[in-house]
Image (spheres, rainbow, N blue to C red):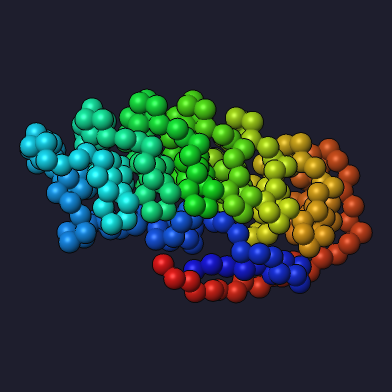
């Protein structure tokens, strides 16, 4: 399902979010149920063993030397993709030892390391990163591993990616940086961590919405206070010509507003009163 937000009476294009895009799409989505990639009629023997985490059977198949460790299934996945998706780190180590390629893309243009991060399989991702996996490869929607990691609660996984030169300001096709995606999850811990690591608080999506605009579009939360402690550019406008300077007074309770602006140390014009009601239209889409 996708959402269209009607902010202040004007429609805004559908945007990326961690929470409502499905695994079957090219964009970010929640992990599929265990065994999602297990269709016996579609998988080769190596793929089945890698997906199931059957180390002994996998060793037997590889010893026969009749199976290409880099063979693809119908969805262009190698055994390494499936081992990563299911968190089988012992299988990942063996496949890397047997020269299984990491720079192979599945049908959604995701590498095994990206798949490991998407499914929050930190041990698998760590093994691949230590063996030279590129954290800045992009999928069909422009998402990097760091975009996926920002949708999870694991700070340590994000740290690993940054240690291996992941691009903190990478933008997907909707213009979302990892910081903006973390804000859609209302994950204050992740947002605070990314800001401390230097994420640009004024980066904007393709609709010119900054971090603070996105935080305000749902409901006032702890993220608003957190973001106002940064060097926020209050002159920014989105594609609806809504200006941050005018959004804050009408969308934050007066007592909260005065507290935030006092802490922020800047005067914000309250001349314009905005209608803070917005409609959410649910659209069905194919998986």
Give the camera-side residue of 275 and 20: 20
Q: Is residue 161 left or right of residue 88?
A: right
- Residue 147 position, x and y percent, is 52, 44
Nearer to the camera, 30 or 172: 172
Residue 159 visible in the displayed image? no
Count of numbered circles in the view: 0
Asked if residue 154 lies left or right of residue 98, the reply is right
Name the residue: 31% across, 49% down.
77
* x and y, in percent, of residue 106 in the image: 37, 49
| Residue 36 rendering spot, x and y as whole percentages | 28, 58
Horizontal placement of 245 versus 155: left or right?
A: right
Query: Looking at the picture, does residue 180 appear above or below residue 247?
Result: above
Residue beneath the point at 68% across and 37% down: 200
Q: Which quadrant would the C terminus be assigned to in this image?
A: bottom left
Give the quadrant of residue 174.
bottom right
Query: Which residue extends farthest right?
Result: 271
Inspect this view and state whether residue 9 appears.
Answer: yes
User: 77 and 240: which one is in front?
Assistant: 77
Q: Residue at x 80, y 42 (%)?
A: 233
- Image coords of residue 1 (percent x, y): 49, 68
| Residue at the image point whose x is 50% and y is 36% from the top | 136
Q: Nearer the viewer, residue 72 or 255?
A: 72
Query: Is 236 above or below relative to 4?
Result: above
Task: Please say if 271 is above or below 145.
Answer: below
């Amino acid at each position: 399902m996708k959402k269209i937000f009607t902010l202040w009476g004007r429609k805004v294009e559908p945007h990326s979010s961690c929470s409502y895009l499905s695994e079957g799409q090219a964009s970010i989505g929640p992990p599929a149920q265990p065994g999602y990639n297990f269709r016996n009629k579609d998988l080769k023997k190596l793929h089945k063993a890698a997906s199931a985490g059957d180390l002994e059977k996998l060793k037997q198949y590889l010893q026969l030397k009749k199976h290409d460790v880099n063979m693809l299934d119908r969805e262009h996945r190698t055994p390494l993709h499936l081992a990563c998706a299911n968190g089988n780190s012992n299988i990942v180590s063996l496949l890397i030892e047997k020269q299984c390629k990491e720079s192979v893309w599945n049908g959604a243009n995701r590498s095994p390391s990206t798949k490991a991060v998407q499914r929050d399989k930190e041990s698998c991702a760590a093994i691949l990163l230590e063996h030279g996996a590129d954290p800045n490869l992009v999928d069909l929607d422009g998402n990097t591993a760091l975009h996926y990691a920002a949708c999870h609660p694991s700070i340590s996984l994000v740290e690993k990616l940054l240690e291996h030169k992941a691009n903190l300001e990478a933008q997907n096709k909707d213009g979302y940086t990892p910081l903006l995606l973390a804000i859609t999850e209302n994950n204050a811990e992740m947002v605070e961590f990314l800001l401390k690591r230097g994420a640009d608080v004024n980066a904007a999506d393709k609709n010119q919405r900054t971090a603070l605009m996105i935080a305000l579009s749902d409901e006032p939360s702890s993220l608003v206070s957190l973001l106002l402690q940064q060097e926020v550019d209050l002159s920014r406008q989105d594609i609806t010509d809504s200006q941050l300077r005018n959004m804050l007074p009408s969308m934050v309770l007066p007592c909260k507003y005065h507290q935030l602006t006092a802490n922020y140390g800047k005067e914000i014009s309250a001349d314009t009163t905005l209608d803070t009601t917005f409609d959410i239209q649910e659209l069905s889409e194919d998986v």
